[in-house]
Image (cartoon, coloured by chain):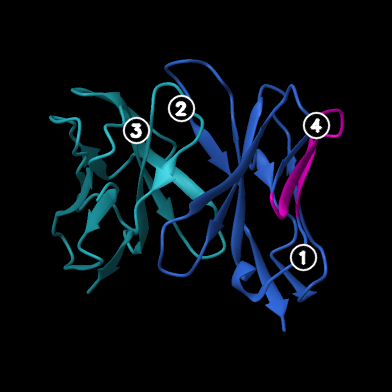
Amino acid sequence: DQQVKQNSPSLSVQEGRISILNCDYTNSMFDYFLWYKKYPAEGPTFLISISSIKDKNEDGRFTVFLNKSAKHLSLHIVPSQPGDSAVYFCAASKSNFGNEKLTFGTGTRLTIIP
Amino acid sequence: DGGITQSPKYLFRKEGQNVTLSCEQNLNHDAMYWYRQDPGQGLRLIYYSQIVNDFQKGDIAEGYSVSREKKESFPLTVTSAQKNPTAFYLCATSTRSTQETQYFGPGTRLLVL
């Protein structure tokens, strides 16, 4: 049972435009969400996160939006740059001290076209 | 230079052989995790440890074993019982205070000969 879903395996966006990556989750107990960026043959790097008490978190070119009623979050990258080409993983956690685990989606490969 | 070190970068295993993947951190993080990544799939949790001398099974622990004798080290052994060990293995760490955010090492690719 895939509790965190990224339904688009790939996305291509023109340089300078906005990239929107989507993620859906099924477990209503999830209350913390993260986005990771991964280059080939490297470990993922943490990008941005959001707690369920917020509906938006912004960090430079990256903004994450959370819609709890729809169990949906999205990552916006604007403007998109060639270095943004990577695989992006959405992850979710149930904050329960001593038992935190991350559940990852299957990833979306973003390609920025120069 | 702080960080998470995984060695080796590539590892070859013969049929029926146990192999051990190393993960070392000097971030003073309490929690450590092992994930496996297969093509087209997300990261799946193998084992995790919140504190020294304690660890728990993740979602796909069968065929794997771990130890946590030191805070800095969390080695993963892929045993001969793991029938499909070819994958990219990732180690991660987190602090107690921000345990939802995990930081990853560079990974080890395991290939079966």
* B107 sits to left or right of B19: right
Q: Position of residue B63 (x, y in %)?
A: 27, 45
Q: Which residue is mark 1?
A: A79
Going by the numbered disc 1, the residue's amino acid type is Pro
Q: Where is B65 relative to A51, above or below?
A: below
First of labels 4, 1 by sequence position: 4
Q: Is residue A114 magenta?
A: no
Q: Chain of mark 2?
A: B
Spatial CA span between label 3 and label 1: 37 Å
At a point 56% along the width and 20% down the height, the residue shown is: A95
Q: Which residues are magenta?
A: A60-76
Disc 4 residue type (three-letter): Asp
Tag 4 secondary structure: loop
SS for callout 1: loop
Q: Are marks 2 and 4 in contact (CB under 8 Å)?
A: no
Query: Among all residues in the image, which is located at the extreme bottom?
Result: A114
Indicate the amino acid at tag 2: Gln
Q: Are marks 2 and 3 in contact (CB under 8 Å)?
A: no
Is A71 part of what is drawn in magenta? yes
Q: Residue at x 25, y 66 (%)?
A: B9
Question: Which chain is blue in the picture?
Answer: A
Residue B77 showing in the rendered view: no
In the rendering, which numbered label is found on residue A55? 4
**Can the viewer see residue B102 in this picture?**
yes
